[in-house]
Image (spheres, rainbow, N blue to C red):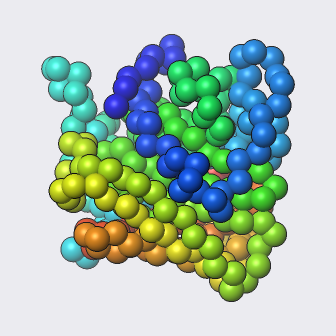
Amino acid sequence: MKKVNPGLTLVLVYTLLLYGCATENHTIYAEPAVKTDIQKNPYNYDNTIFVPSKKYRYNYSIVKNNDTLKYVLTTGKDHQKSWRLVPANYADTNLVASLGIQTLEKKGPIIMENADYDQTEISLLHLNKDGKPLDAELTGVIENKRNIWLHPFRFHAFEILQLSPFPYIKFPFRPHRQFYWKLKLGRHWDELQEVKWKGKLTMKCTYKEEGEEEIRTPLGVLKTYVGTATAKTRIGESSLVSYFNPEYGFVKLVYKNIDSSMIVITLDAGN
């Protein structure tokens, strides 16, 4: 894990848990880079959802043992961050009240240090009640006319999502179509506290495009493409139901995780 400072008051942290090596991802299409200004991301050119001019905010809930929770993030004297789950109605300045996604316009630290990185760089924001970032993850998304594949939130209370299916949709949407993806997770890393394993671990995901459904959101009733996915490893299974809208992207994600928790992330605002 590496820390970078892009000039914000927070520290953007990213892990190089990319979408695996090329041999593991035959079904994910990453478009070729285009020549751009030396500072601009060469993969942003065909995006319509994850573009620098748009910001998305999401509500979330974590359900464990029938309790609906959010989480509080604090920073110690050693500048290390720690977190704990709290009731959803908990009032605290360090409460992560919502989540956000913001696309980087220029090349960020990942591309600057990894010339072969073929994704749009995005910040996954952990926001307080005033919408200010308490922390952020710098990671990537693949968006083009053939598919969209998104790194999930994986810091702090969302670490467990590393072991759940990543949001992924193919175009054109075809109900009942199945496709596959797998990720070599390697050995256990210290950041993931909820689940541990010994030796190397591989996650195998099966996706199915189910059909269309209209869902009610703060932005109105939106038409969505519904997909289901399962992820299997030798230490357990998890699942995801995703709702994708062509204008706003993944507007609802319902995870059932390997630790028996459930995480629901829903679009709250987009501009």
Q: Kindly tell me whether residue 17 is visible in this rendering.
A: yes
Mark count:
0
Q: Quadrant of the C terminus?
A: top right
Residue 156 vertical position relative to residue 169 in the rendered view, above or below: above
Residue 76 vertical position relative to residue 125 in the rendered view, above or below: above
> Residue at 63% of width from left, 51% of height from top?
269
Left or right, 237 with respect to 167, comes to: left
Q: Kindly tell me whether residue 70 is visible in this rendering.
A: no
Left or right, 197 with respect to 60, comes to: left
> Residue at 21% of width from left, 74% of height from top?
65
> Residue at 22% of width from left, 55% of height from top?
199
Residue 190 appears at what percent x and percent y? Answer: 21, 42
To which quarter of the image does residue 248 belong?
bottom right
Camera-side residue of 110 and 265: 110
> Residue at 43% of width from left, 20% of height from top?
4
Residue 93 appears at what percent x and percent y? Answer: 32, 36
Camera-side residue of 10 and 46: 46
Residue 95 appears at what percent x and percent y? Answer: 32, 43
Q: Quadrant of the N terminus?
A: top left
Left or right, 195 with respect to 133, comes to: left
Camera-side residue of 93 and 259: 259
Residue 248 vertical position relative to residue 137 in the rendered view, above or below: below
The residue sitting at the bottom extreme is 176
Left or right, 234 with respect to 232, comes to: left
To which quarter of the image does residue 94 belong?
top left
Residue 58 appears at what percent x and percent y? Answer: 53, 53
Camera-side residue of 225 and 191: 191
